[in-house]
Every structure is written in structure tokens, then in C-alpha cells.
Image (spheres, rainbow, N blue to C red):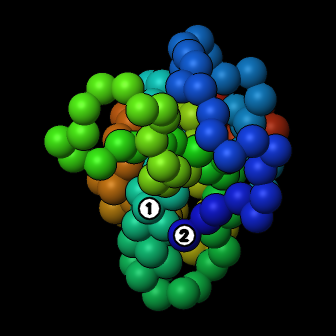
Amino acid sequence: MLLPRKTKFRKAMKGRNDGVATRGTEINFGKYGLKSLSNERITSRQIEAARRAMTRYIKRGGKIWIRIFPHTPVTRKPAEVRMGSGKGALDHYVAKVQAGKILFELDGVDEATAKEAMRLAAMKLPVKTKFLVKAQAGENNEK
């Protein structure tokens, strides 16, 4: 699973996750991409499950790029604990994903294989997604 090596602060506030992404919205590395259509927090476990689903389907051929990283710590208090007595212990890390962000990129396989691999990965994620193909000169890239 993906985890930050070191963070400036051990616990973070929840914050907002609205609006559309302004960075990481274009395919930069591979030929195919998986784009988020909604805002959500994606856990490191979900990212790893999606990566495994893609890797297994393409039988370790091709190359996968993970374009998101879970930086944000999430805390949780134990079950049946009364209110008060501070913030809970660190539980897991999440990546805050906004609409329009490229989540994964893939190259080295044909389009049908890439589309199915991305579909399997998308099933593991809590966001609605769209499969993209990198546009050649003068083409539309959404399929």
C-alpha cells in the first residue's frame, strides 16, 4: 500500500473536497488513462486493489502509472467510545480526488485490453470514471 514516509503533522483536519481539478487532468505518460468524474476520498487500499486488478489482467505486460498519492491522514476513534477525550488515532491515508483528475495511465497493451483493465480497476474505486485514449494531432481523446 502507498503511505507517506514522513508527514509534517501526524493528524490533519478533514477540509473540503469540491470543485474540479486544475492539475493532473491530461494524459502525460501512457497512451490510455482513467479519469475521475466526481470528487471523493480514495484510500490507499482502494488504490492498491485497483492497481492489482489492472496488473493481473494485463498479465504483467505493459506499464502502469499511478497519478494519485494518499497524503492525507484520517483518524478514527474506537467503537463505543464516549464523546470528548481528544481526536482519535491515525487509521489510514487517503488521496483527495477531484473531478477531471487522471487516476491511472497505461501503455504497452492494445486498446481493448487497456479498456478492460481500466474497467476492472474502476470497479474497485468509489468514484465514477471515464476511459480516455491519448489524442493524436487533431483528434478527440474521450471514448
- Local crowd at mark 2 within 10 Å, few (<14), some, or many (≥20)? few
Vertical side of 89 occupied by 98: above or below: above
Q: Position of residue 93 (x, y in %)?
A: 55, 50
Specify whether 5 is left or right of 120. right
Residue at position x 63%, y 40% in the image: 11
* Element class at badge 2: loop
- Name the N-terminal-most of marks 2 and 1: 2
Q: Which amino acid does label 2 sit on?
A: Met
Seen as rendered, the residue at the extreme top is: 19
Quadrant (top left, top right, bottom left, bottom right) of the N terminus: bottom right
Task: Assign a secondary structure to mark 1.
Answer: helix
Say if mark 2 contacts mark 1, CB within 8 Å.
yes
- Amino acid identity at mark 1: Arg
Where residue 90 sits: x, y (%)?
Answer: 51, 51
Q: Nearer the viewer, residue 68 or 63?
A: 68
Residue 41 visible in rendering: no
Question: Residue 45: which numbered mark, if any?
Answer: 1
Marker disc for residue 1: 2
x, y (%) of residue 99? 54, 24
The residue at 74%/21% (across/down) is 22
The one of 11 and 45 positioned closer to us in this rendering: 11
